[in-house]
């Protein structure tokens, strides 16, 4: 029972994470009258002033929520190898999200590497999870997550004068995939859940 409670709480973190992350970014933008969607990157919000405190702390906490969420997935899908691999990758990408806040642009080159790692590893982890769901019993949910994750790469195919727009578009698609995964996984915990991902249909 305690394990079920932990899994449920962890999966709820996956629901909370998008709202918290986007709220932090919105507040940071509101505190930065200089911010320009066409010329700036979102990471510019983390350089100095009140916006830096809001933006960086928001990313750090959002990453921690992602870590807890990933641990919940690891417990829920412990009998499915590919889903566990995807969950581990998602955990690593969550640590990278926190690292973006821990190492803002003022930290130097490391900021570029952790940002690139996050935007690359997160969709990869969700693609693996999506394929894992398709290969098990949940093709509709898996296909939705797979398509959203693949689509997150599309904004980067176009030329932009700044990075804020493609970052936001990619993040929105990733968030949609995460929300689909967390809400669908939560449905597994409805009675009569017995700790087995195959005990009820997800799609």
Image: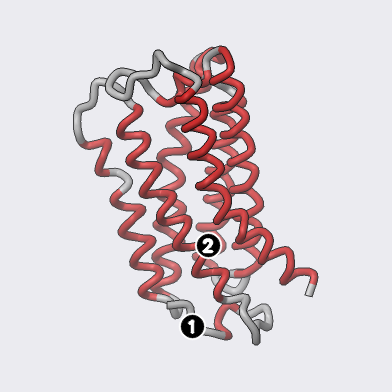
Q: Which residue, as the protein is rendered here, is positioned at the far right?
A: 2
Q: Residue at x 53, y 62 (%)?
A: 182
Q: Is residue 55 above or below residue 2?
A: above
Q: Alpha-carbon distance for marks 2 and 1?
A: 15 Å
Report helix, strand or loop for mark 1: loop
Q: Position of residue 41 (x, y in %)?
A: 38, 23
Q: Residue at x 78, y 75 (%)?
A: 1
* Label 2 Cα crowd, 10 Å radius (few <14 / some 14-19 / many 20+): many
The residue where tag 2 is placed is 182
Q: In front: 108, or 141?
A: 141
State yes or no: discs 2 and 1 in contact (Cβ < 8 Å): no
Quadrant housing residue 55: top right
Mark sitting on residue 19 = none
Which residue in the protein does label 1 denote?
A: 201
Query: Residue 139 at what x, y percent from top left?
Result: 37, 75
Rendered-image quadrant of the C terminus: bottom left
Q: Is residue 181 above or below residue 4?
A: above
Residue at the image position 47 percent from the left and 38 percent from the top: 118
């Amino acid at each position: 029972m305690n394990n079920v409670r932990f899994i449920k709480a962890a999966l709820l973190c996956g629901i909370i994470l998008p709202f918290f992350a986007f709220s932090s970014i919105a507040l940071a933008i509101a505190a930065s009258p200089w911010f320009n969607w066409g010329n700036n990157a979102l990471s510019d919000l983390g350089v100095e002033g009140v916006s830096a405190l809001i933006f960086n702390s928001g990313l750090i906490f959002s990453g921690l929520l992602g870590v807890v969420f990933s641990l919940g997935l690891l417990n829920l899908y412990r009998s499915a190898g590919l889903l566990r691999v995807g969950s581990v990758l998602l955990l690593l990408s969550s640590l990278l999200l926190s690292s973006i806040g821990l190492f803002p642009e003022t930290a130097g080159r490391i900021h570029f590497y952790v940002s690139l790692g996050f935007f690359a590893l997160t969709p990869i982890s969700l693609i693996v999870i999506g394929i894992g769901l398709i290969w098990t019993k949940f093709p509709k949910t898996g296909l939705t997550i797979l398509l959203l994750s693949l689509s997150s790469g599309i904004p980067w195919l176009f030329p932009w004068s700044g990075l804020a727009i493609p970052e936001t578009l990619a993040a929105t698609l990733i968030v949609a995939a995460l929300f689909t995964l967390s809400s669908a996984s939560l449905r597994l915990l409805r009675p009569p859940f017995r700790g087995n991902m195959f005990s009820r249909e997800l799609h």
